[in-house]
Image (cartoon, rainbow, N blue to C red):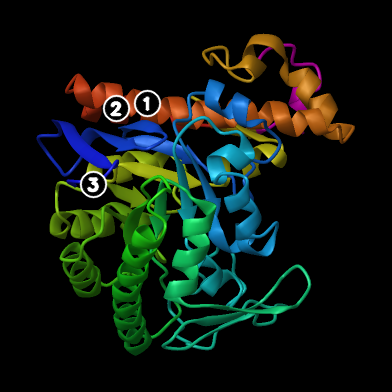
Amino acid sequence: MPGSAFSFSIGTRMPDGHGRTGTISTPHGTIRTPAFIPVGTKASVKATLPESVRDLGAQAVLANAYHLYLQPGADIVAEAGGLAAFMNWPGPTFTDSGGFQVLSLGAGFKKVLAMDAGHRDDDVIAPGKERLAVVDDDGVTFRSHLDGSEHRFTPEVSMRVQADIGADIAFAFDELTTLNNTRDYQELSLERTRLWAERCLVEHTRLRHEHPHRPFQALFGVIQGAQYEDLRRKAARDLGAMDFEGFGIGGAIEKASLPEIVGWVTAELPEDRPRHLLGIGEPGDLFAGVAAGADTFDCVSPSREARNSAVYTPDGRFNLLTSANRRAFVPIDDQCDCYTCANYTRAYLHHCFKAKEMVGATLATIHNIRFVVRLVDRMRDAMEAHDFSAFRAEWLGRYYAGSAA
């Protein structure tokens, strides 16, 4: 990627797949890949300080353009000096375009993308929800979940909002469908996303010239296509031929199909550009994504699970609120090097959650983020040692063998 402050170099390649290690260079620092990127939707990784997230080994964070546009406003983030300065984050940043809100505010399903894949309905909406987003060929009309006010996002608006927020890596505005949508609608949506990608590139380039003083912002195209091999491959070829600095792999993906779908996409994308797998954070899915050629990942799961008292260990996930932990004066995981495991017991965390003390969520989040970040780091080390397959089999065999509590 000549003439920019953004680059990607490939390190070790896996001999039996698309997986590879690499380095992404941005104006705010480098990211060694594969890497897990914690989500700070509103410029905050919930229940933690940015300094803590950095100490846990996270190399970057991802915020959401739509949420920051609503509150506090992209102009305020710009006036603060951009996302990293605003939230006191010392490294690279990503922003999601708002494309996920096309689904979550439209169909109301939030993270439940698959639903009943056997039932096709292009007007599907979650029970008890009302439609807060309506899509047309030019863009999306949203009603704010905060106050009901109406807002309009087009590819151009998303690019302007993300340029103001100033993350190192932005994503093109896309339409996220569900697995309930018909094949005809998936085809229509894929073409709409392709045309939006072209418009995003034009506006993004215009903004670079208009604001030459701003740090270089890379733009990633987003590959959609649901579960259909021909649509996924077409999207990867179409966007891969465009002048994006990298690519996001998004959309509704059933977990069982994840390695196959990511493999279709990475087989078609240019090898010399990074690939980000959007919304993936469970250990088994991370192994599958790395093996299939994804370079970076983001997901709210580690912090969301932590706030609900669920924590990860090498022997599986368990809930701190169970009675077995009431007198468990041992760490969450005696192999973990995080601050929580070095200083606090399961019994104390059980008490904090029972007593609804906020520090419980903080301590559990510290552990979960460290656990997932460290896991992906260990995957990278195993790839560089040409030992990924053995590490994967041993680690997953233990993790899924049973419950830790």
Tell me which residue sits at (61%, 33%) in the image: 88
Indicate yes or no whether the magenta region holds residue 326.
yes
Magenta-drawn segment: 319-331
Tell me which residue sits at (55%, 64%) in the image: 112
Per the image, the residue denoted by label 2 is 380
Q: Tell me whether circle 1 and circle 2 mark residues in contact (CB < 8 Å).
A: yes
Report x, y in % for residue 351: 84, 25
Residue 276 in the figure: left or right of residue 313? left
Residue 57 lies, with reference to residue 233, above or below; the image says above
Per the image, the residue denoted by label 1 is 377
Per the image, the residue denoted by label 3 is 292
Residue depth check, mark 2 versus mark 3: number of the one nearer the observer: 2
Q: Secondary structure at mark 1?
A: helix
Helix, strand or loop for the magenta stretch, by majority: loop
**Quadrant of residue 362 in the image?**
top right
Front position in the image: 124 or 156: 156
